[in-house]
Amino acid sequence: MKSHPRASVASSFTIIKGALINESYAVLAAWDLARSKRENLDRLRHENFIGAPTSTWLRDLAKVLNRRLEPEGRDRALVMLAQSGCDLIEWKPILLWHITRDEFLLRDFLENWLFPAYDAGVSRVQSAEVQAYLRGTAKRGGVTEHAWSEATLQRVAAGLLKMAVEFGLLRGKAVKTFNAYSLPERSFLYLLHVLREANPNPRNIIEAPDWRMYLMRPADVEQEILRLHQFHKLDYQVAGSLAQMKLPCATSAQYAERMVA
């Protein structure tokens, strides 16, 4: 059987289980970096230190966390921030960026369906439209683990919309509408650091598709950068087509430490 990069796998299971924001925060706040991921998740299942209602729910949470996060590696900043008491309002959008490194469906939905709808001025978001988008997952590079039934399509569409609500991008229950979302300042600065690590060119940072997940256009990103420059929280210089940006720290890990210092 041909294997596929994890980042291209469209997992219905993780989407249906939801964002699990508070649960992820609680687990990572108790994470022991001296132990392996497997040891930490085994401890979660055996001790249930977050007070999960059932063993089945706890098992599924462990599965989702195992799939989404690498706490000893690229997601270590999430652990450090949670253990240092980072405000959940700031932690939540950082979590979103981290889990979308491998969560193909969520990333693709936010960048290539929800943001275009927002940018086009759509007022209401409907599940049936999301289901139609999901039928084209393979055309956008997503690999499903198995063929989805109509019932699975409905559950995945509902799950994506629910996650958008949980991350503050949408609001409402039966009818979903766009929220007046505002990315917290320090979360924004953290994202600038992680995007610079991938590509140091300021223009590429501003135009990175990642900002779509927060309903931000390139002009919105640049406006926020200019505001932060005005308040001396970063340095941004533009001369014609050339731009230079100096951020507070050398790396995103250093900035995460500064957030909770």
Image (tube, rainbow, N blue to C red):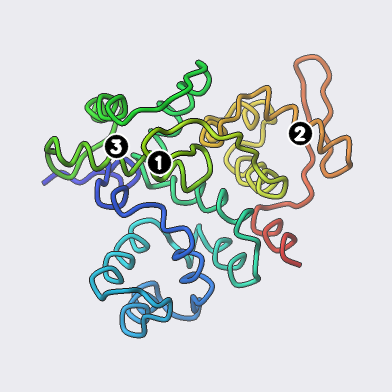
Q: Which residue is mark 3?
A: 157
Rendered location of residue 30, percent (x, y): 50, 77
- Whichever of labels 1 and 2 marks the residue nearer the N terminus, that label is 1
Mark 1, residue position: 173
At label 1, counting other C-alpha atoms closer than 10 Å, the crowd grade (few under 14, some 14-19, many 20 or more) is: few
What residue is at 26 percent from the left and 29 percent from the top?
131
Residue 125 is left or right of residue 46, and the answer is: right
Q: Nearer the viewer, mark 1 or mark 2?
A: 1
Amino acid at pointer 3: Ala
- Earlier sequence position, callout 3 versus callout 2: 3
Up-down relation of residue 28 to residue 175 (above or below): below
> Any mark on residue 205, and which?
none
Residue reaching furthest front? Answer: 174
The alpha-carbon separation of the residues under discs 1 and 2 comes to: 34 Å
Q: Residue drawn at (63%, 32%), measured in percent from left and top?
A: 205
Classed neighbour count for the residue bearing mark 3: other residues with Cα under 10 Å, few (<14), some (14–19), many (≥20): many
Q: Determine the image quadrant of residue 202.
A: top right
Asked if residue 121 is positioned above or below residue 38 in the image, the reply reads above
Residue type, numbered disc 2 = Ile
Q: Which residue is tagged 2? A: 225
Q: Position of residue 230 (x, y in %)?
A: 88, 35
- Please name the amino acid that badge 1 sits on: Lys
Please tell me which residue lies in front, 52 or 202: 52
- Element carrying mark 1: loop
In the displayed structure image, the side of residue 160 where residue 56 appears, left or right? left
User: Residues under labels 1 and 3: Cα distance?
Assistant: 14 Å
Element on which disc 3 rests = helix
